[in-house]
Image: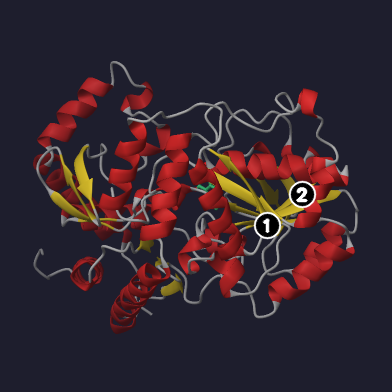
Amino acid sequence: MTSIDRSKLQQLHARENSRFISEHPRSAELYRRAQDSLLGGVPMNWMKKWAGPFPIFVKSAQGAHFIDVDGRDYVDLCLGDTGAMTGHSPEIVAEAVSRRVREGITLMLPTEDSLWVGEELKRRFGLPFWQFTLTATDANRFAIRIAREITQRPKILVFHYCYHGTVDESFAALHEGTVGPRRGNIGPPVNPAETTRVVEFNDLAALEEALKHHDVACVLAEPAMTNVGIILPDDGYWTVARELTHRYGALLIADETHTICAGPGGCTREWNLDPDMLVFGKPIGSGIPGATYGCTEEVAQRISARIHLEDCDVGGIGGTLAGNALSLAAMRATLEHVLTPAAFERMIPLAQRFAEGVAAEIRSVGLPWNVTKLGARAEYTFSQRPPRNGAESAASADFELERFLHLYALNRGVLLTPFHNMALMCPATTEADVDLHTKIFAAAVRELIEPCRGVL
Ligand SMILES: Cc1ncc(COP(=O)(O)O)c(C=O)c1O
């Protein structure tokens, strides 16, 4: 098997850093200026995590491409980590949103768009009742509150290395089998062991063991894990897992925020899952802030019986701007015209093309890596076989190597997510965009393992 020479990796990385700095003078200047007013020089701390010594500043974005302040054009395979899975600023959404902006943005009163969206979500996902929030994090938080309230149980259960937004309870991980704060957890309010049970994905025995305590209000899960690489469920996993949640009285919340990439109704529809609640955020309004959670008739009845009119504004569920007219107008245009079944028919084969191209290159150079795919999303990991759970996937992570490959791609006009090696297709992505990445990926790995090749 081919292996990576670390000193060569570092040399190549230093070369790519110099190229990046010399080609992005305007971004460098803005980043220097930002040090005086923005904490860490960025509007949001993750923006420091991009490959390269500073983030590139964006001038404009359209469809699958964006242009930075130095005038360079990029194929965007990150797409705002799914927030722009619709492509950037789809024309029809831009029109609906600009109309709505002139007709009232937020009122704490419903608009007719909310009904259209609720009816469409019901049709897509099969759950009858819906509510709106501004972020998927909030949707998860509120779904958890509802689960706790109606089950009167204190704990939630998540999978090791999950990510569900900045939900306190979900920042838990296993440390040699014991639950504790996840690495990097900033100021945890309590030890998450008090609020959370954590098990490995694809381990039904561990799931049953955790549910047997009868203190789990809900299992909060992505149907396939997407935030530590892509981890697909074993055949039949969800049938048994669902049966276990029923048997032990825990609700099942499907967080489809990323797995919506599987199809217009997410994995829930593709795989015939039947969650008690479902969360969907990020691209639902083409990037205009908005998210949603839906529930079954039974959950709706149980929670409605416990919420009293006089206290409904102080119960910990809601937000002043949640369900605002602008979000709903964006969601309607997105669901009606952009994230349509026809769009998925275009996007999914592109992810297949990405996966096949990268896998062929990995095979041809003999690296012990693999590529996984879920609908319109594909991802390569530095392990021989696709990981089956969070620990396996995390063990194969290689921050240094990942940063080099991302910077190499960025320097040649392709943006990947800064968190792992995910590539996402939008309706505007083309085969040429995908093939450009494959060509760059091939050049990068060949440079890594064959010292004498020229520079792309
Ligand atoms: C599966 C999943 N759920 C929820 C969220 C939270 O989304 P947001 O940060 O928009 O609240 C994320 C964010 O990455 C996510 O990956």
Residue sitting at 34 percent across and 21 percent down?
A: 38
Q: Amino acid at mark 1?
A: Pro
Q: Secondary structure at mark 2?
A: helix
Q: Horizontal and vertical percent for residue 125? A: 60, 63
* Mark 1: few/some/many CA within 10 Å (<14, 14-19, 20+): some
Q: Quadrant of the N terminus?
A: bottom left
The residue at the point 54 percent across, 65 percent down is: 266
Which corner quadrant holds the C terminus?
A: bottom left
Taking the image as drawn, is residue 450 in sight?
no
What's the colour scheme? secondary structure
Which disc number belongs to residue 226? none
Q: Position of residue 369 (x, y in %)?
A: 41, 73
What residue is shown at x 52% (from left), y 62% (from top)? 259
Q: Percent x, y for residue 322?
A: 55, 34
Three-letter amino acid code at disc 2? Ala
- Counting from the top left corner in percent of width and height, residue 323 is at 54, 37
Q: Residue furthest top?
A: 36
Q: Nearer the viewer, residue 319 or 188?
A: 319
Query: How packed is label 2: few (under 14 Cα within 10 Å), some, or many (20 or more)?
Result: some
Quarter where residue 248 is shown:
bottom right
Residue under pointer 2: 300
Q: Secondary structure at mark 1?
A: loop
Alpha carbons under labels 2 and 1: distance apart: 9 Å
Q: Specify whether 135 is left or right of 451.
A: right
342, 228: nearer the viewer:
342
Mark 2 or mark 1: whose residue is earlier in sequence = 1
Relative placement, left or right, of 244 versus 398 is: right
Q: Is residue 397 in view?
A: yes
Name the residue tied to disc 1: 128
Asked if marks 2 and 1 touch (Cβ < 8 Å), the reply is yes
